[in-house]
Amino acid sequence: MPEILSAREVVKRFGDTVAVDGLALSVHAGEIYGLIGPNGAGKTTTLRILSGLLRPSGGSAQVAGFDVEAQPRAARSRLGFVTGSAGLYGRLTPRELLEFFGRLHGMTKDAIARRTSALAGELDLSEILDRRADKLSTGQKQRVSIARALLHEPPALILDEPTAGLDVLASDSLRRYVKAARAAGCAILYTTHYLAEAELLCDRIGLIHRGRLLAEGTPHELRSQTGAESLERAFLDLVRAQA
């Protein structure tokens, strides 16, 4: 499958602090790639570079073949971004939000209406489409955020801690939506603090620590590499080996 998202020897410095240190990864169409690591490991910085929100100090990032720095509009138009904070305009309804963001993407009114109807069915939004966003539950807001990210049918999707703050049922529903996006051919970069979730959901995983990839592979490959019974134990073993 073609490579859709990529970081090539990316470096990011904040003064004397190196947040990302020569990071290289790629995510292919129809794949969920988990970027896993502790707070301060460089995950969020990497995602911001891939999305064009931060400029790297070195290296490059691409979305669907477009360089994020040299061709920012083309790259961003092919990317959907969801964070666990689920920031929505509280006074707008989901329908109004989707129309607003659809126009930002240059979609026609008819195209927005068609995609809104389709996503409402896929993400179970029909009953809340005309309810103000500040009246929605955390899980409902997160589903609206996913709809917003998928509205323009991007080939790449970044999900930054999407299940943070969700209960068990809402988390399970969100994972089903993510799997459906993968089945539709989307390339998905997924971060989570829950290693059991990553093991369950991700096709490949990159373990990041101090801005560097310690290891990369399928959950089975990472466990086999260290002889660990779980991904969590494999990660701990790899971190301690670097100490």
Image (cartoon, helix red, strand yellow):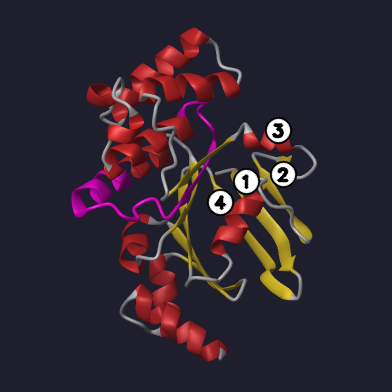
Camera-side residue of 79 and 205 = 79
Image quarter hosting the C terminus: bottom right
Q: Amino acid at mark 3?
A: Arg
Marker disc for residue 72: none
Give the crowd class for mark 1: few <14, some 14-19, many >=20 residues within 10 Å.
many
**Residue 132 in the image: x percent, y percent?**
32, 27
**Residue 54 in the image: x percent, y percent?**
69, 52
- Label 3 or label 4, whichever lies nearer to me, is 3
**CB under 8 Å between discs 3 and 2:** no
Q: Earlier in the sequence, mark 4 or mark 1?
A: 4
Residue 225 vs residue 229: left or right? right
Distance between the alpha carbons at the discs numbered 3 and 4: 20 Å
The local secondary structure at tag 2 comes to loop
Marker disc for residue 73: 3
Marker disc for residue 27: 4
Q: Quadrant of residue 211?
A: bottom right
Distance between the alpha carbons at the discs numbered 2 and 4: 15 Å
**CB under 8 Å between discs 2 and 1:** yes
Give the crowd class for mark 3: few <14, some 14-19, many >=20 residues within 10 Å.
few
Q: Quadrant of residue 183?
A: top left
**Residue 127 in the image: x percent, y percent?**
22, 23
Q: Amino acid at mark 2?
A: Val
Q: Tell me if residue 79 is in the magenta stretch.
A: no
Residue 45 vs residue 236: left or right? right
**Residue 240 in the image: x percent, y percent?**
49, 89
Residue 143 lies, with reference to residue 195, above or below; the image says above
Marker disc for residue 68: 2
- Name the residue: 20% across, 54% down: 168
Q: How many marks?
A: 4
Q: Report the span colored magenta.
A: 151-176
